[in-house]
Amino acid sequence: MMALSLTLKCILFASVFLVGVAADEQKSQVNLPLEEFQKLFTSAQVEEAKRLILDKYKIDEDEHKQKLKALEAKSKLLDNRLQQQKHLFFPENFQVLQHTASGMFNSSAEDAGVDGDVASFDIELTFRVMESSKWTKVPLVNTTSTVSSNWEVSQQAIDSNAFHTVDTVTGKDEDGVLLFLRNDQQVLATNQSGLFKVKYNAYTRVSKSRNLNAMGLSNLLYPLSGLSFQIATDASQSVKEFSVQPPSSVLRVKSGENYTNIIATLPLTADSFQIKWVDFREDFGQAKAPKEDSDSNVDTKSKQEGPEPNQDRLQQEFPQVTANHEVMHTIGEGTIRSLHSLEFKSSSEMPNLSSVQFLVHGDGVRVTSVVGHALQSWTVEEAQGTTSSSLVKAIFKTSQLDSTVALKVHTEKDRSDLSDILVELPRIECKNVLRQTGHVAIIKDANVEVHEHKTFGLSRCEPSDLSSKLRLNVDRPIVLSYKYLNPQNSAVLSVKEHAAMETLEATIDRIHYKALVTETHTFHSIIMLVQSTKLQYLEMLGLPTTASKFTVMVNSVPAKPVQGEGRKNSILVPLLIGLDQEAANEGGNLRTSVEVSYFSTHDNLGKNGTLSLNPPWFELPISVVTAHLRLPMSDENPFNYTFSGDFGSKPLRHLDYPIPDAFSYATAKRVVPDDYEFSIVDDMWPEDEENDRSASKVGAVKIVTPLTGRSFFFQRLLVVDKELALNVTFKEKEQPVELSWWQRLIRKT
């Protein structure tokens, strides 16, 4: 009853709740006409469309802002990259475009002396300043080596190609250009970008020695792109025989009435230049002839017998020449090679060293070459009054205007009688010189022992006392060194020659021999690492008589073996293949990897027998020899193997030394852009693919051996001139006989 009453109460409560909800719904409903409802619905649609349009506009605006930010970031990145590139090429924020010099010199009167000889140059420097965000300092000239004046700075206007003069004295803010002295340099500073042109006058002394003139500018901050120079002359004067430094400069000379124009093209790396020329006058070197006068009764003979002051002046100022002689003697097997360095220096800068002469003393001494600056020709003839000396004459070109000339003379002397251990060194004696001094150095070559036997006019000195011409031009230690003050000297040496012994040309670091045995064939493969000093062929001995189908790889490059003469069962493997050419030409130790594979045949294995699997042997020392045998092994035909020979009877579980790997000296060749940035990826697969393609082009064949059979390992250390034997005796395992139940029972009991 209680349960029934509870159910009735729940039903009553639910009915009351539903009636209340229905009443509330009726209260919330509003009745509208159709037209008003349509207006309200249309207004709601319009508001919804406006909201959607505003949302889309906001989304588009956000996307546009993001694109603008990306473009600004990209533009900023490009600007930064451009600034970095500009800073890379122009770290000082300026670029010199043109640097020219136009000079002029007017010969002064003779009574003015050297102080009146000054040449002036109009220097013009044009440069571009890259950025105006900072102050840029442009050094113009070294004030310690160049006298300058009349400075003028002009700047190109932004809206035109014309230059306007800039006031650098007051330093106005609107100009932004200052000219000042700093660290012994005239410097222009500016905070503006654009083209600038600086003009100034530079002055230099013209040194004169008789009729030789020399002038130039040194320590220039920038190379000259153009140089012109005008020399003013009078009617009785002519300018000839020009010389310019650097020697690689190109001169163009144009002569006119009372002037000579010189246009020079200098190397772009020259920071200085010097021009020399010779003044020729009609009255120089001879007396002025008197004017003929028909009314004069003066005896012409008395005029001709008068003094000639110019000739006397030439004789008084005739220059004195000194000579310096440096010689390096190389004592070799059967020959003496000598390198003589001669330097002739005149006391005057008059170009009178048009030729020099010197004697080469010594029996059988040959002059092989004579070289020097501005040398035109040289001749060798037998000296008068002696048969053991030669006279060498060297003639220089007319463009040789220096007061110092240098020659290098090479001589040779054969030692025909090797039993004579006393050898006299050749020497050089310069003719027509005031004084001759020098040094003598001796080095030995090959298997020669050198000692001093007797000397005259020479005094011993330390090798450190020798000039750099001798010490810095040899790659061997100096054995003996002397100095002398008189060319009348001699040196006799005691020379002993020792017989040379043969040394080891090559050695083998490691050899790995692998043999795969089948029923009727054996596949042999060998890989080795060889050290050699240009050994041309490596001979492999002890090959099977049935060996065939060879493949050879030297430094991972295919090669063809050749058949040797005189020895059977051997081949010759070429080693000078695929080497590092630079290391090979330097004569260093060459590491070479060699891979050889071949086949051999044998009788059918059968149930038992003996196989000889001897690895090839070499007439070279071998550090490590390892062997890997893969012998047949199956459940149907199981074998028992026993081993004998030089490797022992017990195989190893593993090898103590790693198997050598073949290597290659080949490098890839690819064309990349200038701004390509290399990474570690370039050292990996692209180069390997290129090597694979190059190897496939030449037809490289490499046999892939299958993994079959049972492996046995052997090794041997320090093998010298020995043929290693490795014999394998095999016997088929006996199959166990199956016993009956009563036989097994009896065996157990």
Image (tube, rainbow, N blue to C red):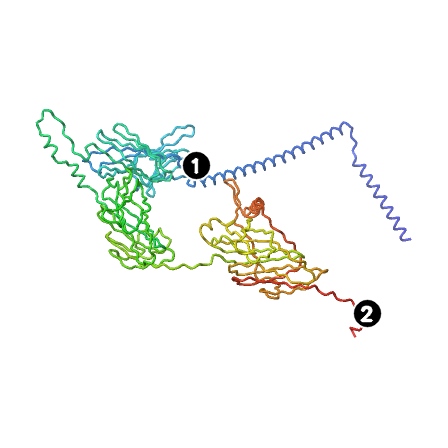
Query: Type of residue at label 1?
Result: Met
Secondary structure beneath dot 2 equals helix
Q: Where is 195 relative to 532, above or below?
A: above
Q: Where is 93 relative to 462, above or below?
A: above
Is residue 579 shown to the viewer in this render?
yes
Q: Position of residue 40 (x, y in %)?
A: 73, 30
Q: Nearer the viewer, residue 37 or 218?
A: 218
Q: Are marks 2 and 1 in contact (CB under 8 Å)?
A: no
The circle drawn on residue 741 is 2
User: Which residue is disc 1 drawn over?
Assistant: 130
Is residue 198 shown to the viewer in this render?
no
Q: Position of residue 53 (x, y in %)?
A: 66, 32
Is 287 displayed left or right of 145 in the figure?
left
Q: Where is 509 relative to 37, above or below?
A: below
Q: Hey, which residue is sitting farthest bottom in the picture?
A: 749
**Quick one: label 2, few (<14), some, or many (20+) residues within 10 Å?**
few
Mark before the other along the chain sequence, 2 or 1: 1
Q: Position of residue 650 (x, y in %)?
A: 62, 66
Secondary structure beneath dot 1 equals loop
Q: Where is 301 relative to 542, above or below?
A: above
